[in-house]
Each structure stands twice: as C-alpha cells, then as structure tokens.
Image: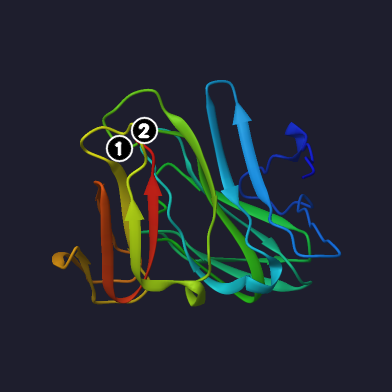
Amino acid sequence: FAVVQLSLSDQLASGTVENKGFKVTSSAAISGYYLSRRQATTDMSYLIDGERLGTNYVVAGYQNIYEDQMSVQATQDNTVVTFTPKDGAPFQVTLNAGQTYMHTARSQLTGSSILADKPIAVFSGNRCTNVPTGVTACDHLVEQMPSIDQLSSSYLLAQTPRTGTNGNVMRVVATADNTEVRVNGTLVATLSNKGDFYEGRVKDGIQVDATKPVLVAQYLI
C-alpha cells in the first residue's frame, strides 16, 4: 500500500469554487481509502472508483452541534451541479474537472439532493456531531456517497462490537416518494417524500427492505 499525505491547506472552504480536487490513477485495479484524523476523533471513507460515479445523489449526514457538510468534485469541465438542501432552496454551481464546492448548514442535510449533468464525486460530513443526539463527546464524520443508480432496496446490517444493548444508529433515506421501510419484515416507516428518512438502531443483525431504492447509513454511537 501507499500513503499519500494531504495538507490542512487542502481542506475545503464553504460556499466557494476551489481547485482542490485529487485524482488517483493506476496501471491495475486498486482500492482506495480516505482517512481524516485529528486529536480525539478519526473517520474514514472507502473511495468509489471513477467508473461508478453518477449524476444523481441523496446525502446522509448527522447534524446537531456544528454544520452538516456536503461537497462535490467534478470529473469533467463545465459540469452544472444543482444542490437542493433539505428544507432549502435549490442553487446551481458550475465546475471544471478537479474543481470542488462544499455547502454547509447548521441544520439537517440528511435527505438533501445533488444532481449534475456529468458524473461527480459526492461527500458528506460534519465537523463534530453527537450520535445519537443527546449524548456527549462529539466526533467528526466523512463519507463518500454512492449515486442513486448504485443503491438497492434491500440491505443486511450487522451491529459492531462493544456498542451496548442499543446497537448502532442507522438512517434510511428515501430516493423516491411514498417509500415503505421494513426492518426484519415489520413496517417501521412510510417516507412520503424523497429525502425523508427513518432513524433506527442496528441490534445484532437486521434486514432492511424498502419498496423503492434507499440510501442506508450506519453510524457508530
């Protein structure tokens, strides 16, 4: 494996187009991970390869203290990206290949939509958040989002070790209106609108089924 160090100066700023994108290429197939570490908090994301990047996304975050974040990196010049923040007004940004744009909000961005006319990479995150709301000792989040065409309507989730009797937190985000969500065969939510989400717990192993494709995110408590 190889480790590539990125400078703190490469952090994205909110609400501005920047030339801060990175592209990794190789002569043979590789897997890539992005590790974000600072004192007392670490998170990591698996990187989705360029051939599987899409143009239509919903986002999962977790906001209750600092800002939720969602960002994009363009793969081609003159890419028009439409951001529709959860409960906010849509806005557009035009990016060239390698350019980035990050939107932040002191409100919930889970369920936000990002649409582009060319393939883009989409990330979500949070500076520091409590999972679930009401606990202490926040941690930051970062994760690359899969595009809607890569999502499923059925998922198997397993509880991570040492997370207590309540298990992990999960969110199920609708990609279409009128989506029914079942956990182990029991109806737990009907998500009326695209971007609505259900929050539950992962105890032992569970199966999540929906009537339409959904984005499922699992969080350490």
Q: Residue at x 38, y 50 (%)?
A: 218
Q: Quadrant of the C terminus?
A: top left
Does 201 sit left or right of 104 as displayed? left
Say few, some or many: other residues with alpha carbon within 10 Å of mark 2 (under 14 / 14 to 19 / 20 or more). Answer: some
Does 35 sit left or right of 58 as displayed? right
Q: Is residue 108 visible?
A: no
Q: Tell me if label 2 and label 1 are in contact, CB under 8 Å.
A: yes
Report which residue position mark 2 lands on: 130
Q: Is residue 19 above or below residue 126?
A: below
Q: Residue at x 27, y 62 (%)?
A: 207
Q: Is residue 133 above or below residue 103?
A: above
Report which residue position mark 1 lands on: 132
User: In the depicted view, which residue is nearer to us: 40 or 61?
Assistant: 40
Does 178 sit left or right of 46 as displayed? left
Amino acid under disc 2? Asn
Amino acid under disc 1? Pro
Q: Is residue 96 above or below residue 169?
A: below
